[in-house]
Amino acid sequence: MDFLVLFLSYLATVLASVVMLCVCSKTGRLRGLVGGATRRVSRFTPECLQRSVRSLFHYLFHTRNHSFLLLHLALQGMVYSEYTWEVVAYCRELEFSLFYLLQPYLLLAVSLVFFAVTCVSNPGIVTKANELSLLQVYDFDEVVFPKDARCSTCDVRKPARSKHCRVCNWCVHRFDHHCVWVNNCIGAWNIRYFLIYLSALTASAATMAAVCSAFLIHLVAASDLYQEPYVDDLGHWRTVDVVFLTQYLFLTFPRVVLLLGFLTVLSLLLVGYLCFSVYLALTNQTALEWYRQGSAPDPRRPLVAGRARSVHSRGLRANLRELFLPVVPCCEGKKE
């Protein structure tokens, strides 16, 4: 039964990760597919259930709450518990290098530190105190960011590359996106922490997957199982193949195999998102600008790989310097 619970929890985590990628990507085609599927399902769903689901989604994705933050910590605790009690324990008996086994814990410490910093840091909230200084940071393009735009909710002039977050209810300088996993906006002043956190999280998942793989490969190599023939259900002698080895390892070490499968899927998702985030950083774009340029491109901008080049890009070194050493008015230190 505990294996079933573990598998269902991992499956739910993968589905939640996929849903979050769908929500955060905001591509037009994806939104169309989701909308079409929702309309088809709604024909067979009671109205009361639809209202409950809409209310739940509104609470989870359109209001500030700690649901995904707590889910993140709970899942991380579950994964590291399985890794500690199943993988590390077996690997110590096989005399694996202790430094190799402890790397995920070092990456965990780094990721948790920058996770906490990302959660509580000021993303770049535009206030009346810093409004004038932030208006001078970026030039207005008069296409996506008009010069005289004003936020009616915050009652401030909107600097170029800023956006009002409907979840947090404030305007954010160089707004990238709102991340439900950290319950905070990602903007000019905390995107550096977010990238380090995302890198450490990706590295920790990939490192644990590598340790799990090394453990299972070591078991197969030490037992010479891959050289042994076996009798199938029809009574025929067969040579050991990948399918048989996978079934054998799953029956012998089910929790380790399930953990490896979950970490592999998670690593692929995180690597994909990290590569996209690094691409945006190197080209001095935000996720919001990337999406807007893809849905409504500016014909006056030169094209690079089918998309308009960012007008704010000043070269690789300058882009990274701007990301990790942003302009922060001296009056701004914490969230207001």
Image (cartoon, helix red, strand yellow):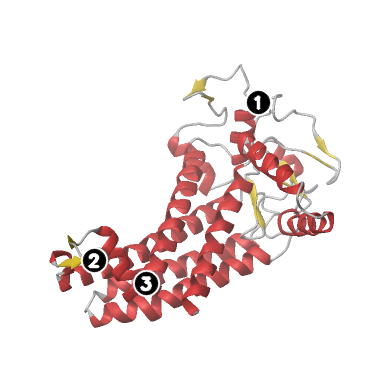
Judging depth in this view, the residue of 325 and 114 nearest the camera is 114
Density class for disc 1 (Cα within 10 Å; few <14, some 14-19, many ≥20) is few
C-alpha distance separating marks 1 and 2: 50 Å
Judging depth in this view, the residue of 311 and 1 nearest the camera is 1
C-alpha distance separating marks 3 and 1: 47 Å
Mark 1 belongs to which amino acid?
Ala
Q: Which residue is mark 2?
A: 217
Q: Is residue 109 left or right of residue 153?
A: left
Judging depth in this view, the residue of 316 and 244 nearest the camera is 244
Q: Position of residue 37 (x, y in %)?
A: 67, 43
Tell me, yes or no, whether the two marked residues, 2 and 3, touch with CB atoms within 8 Å. Answer: no
Q: Is residue 187 at all visible to an observer of this figure? A: no
Q: Position of residue 132 (x, y in %)?
A: 75, 40
Q: Nearer the viewer, mark 1 or mark 2?
A: 2
Density class for disc 2 (Cα within 10 Å; few <14, some 14-19, many ≥20) is few
C-alpha distance separating marks 2 and 3: 12 Å
Secondary element under disc 3, as helix, strand or loop, is helix
Q: Is residue 152 at all visible to an observer of this figure? A: yes
Q: Which residue is mark 3?
A: 256
Image position of 2 with respect to 170: above or below: below
Residue pictured at 77% horizontal, 53% vertical: 45
Q: Is residue 198 left or right of residue 166?
A: left
Image position of 318 with respect to 11: above or below: above
Residue pictured at 80% horizontal, 47% vertical: 128
- For marks 2 and 3, the one nearer the N-term is 2
Q: Which residue is mark 1?
A: 296
Q: Position of residue 296 (x, y in %)?
A: 65, 25
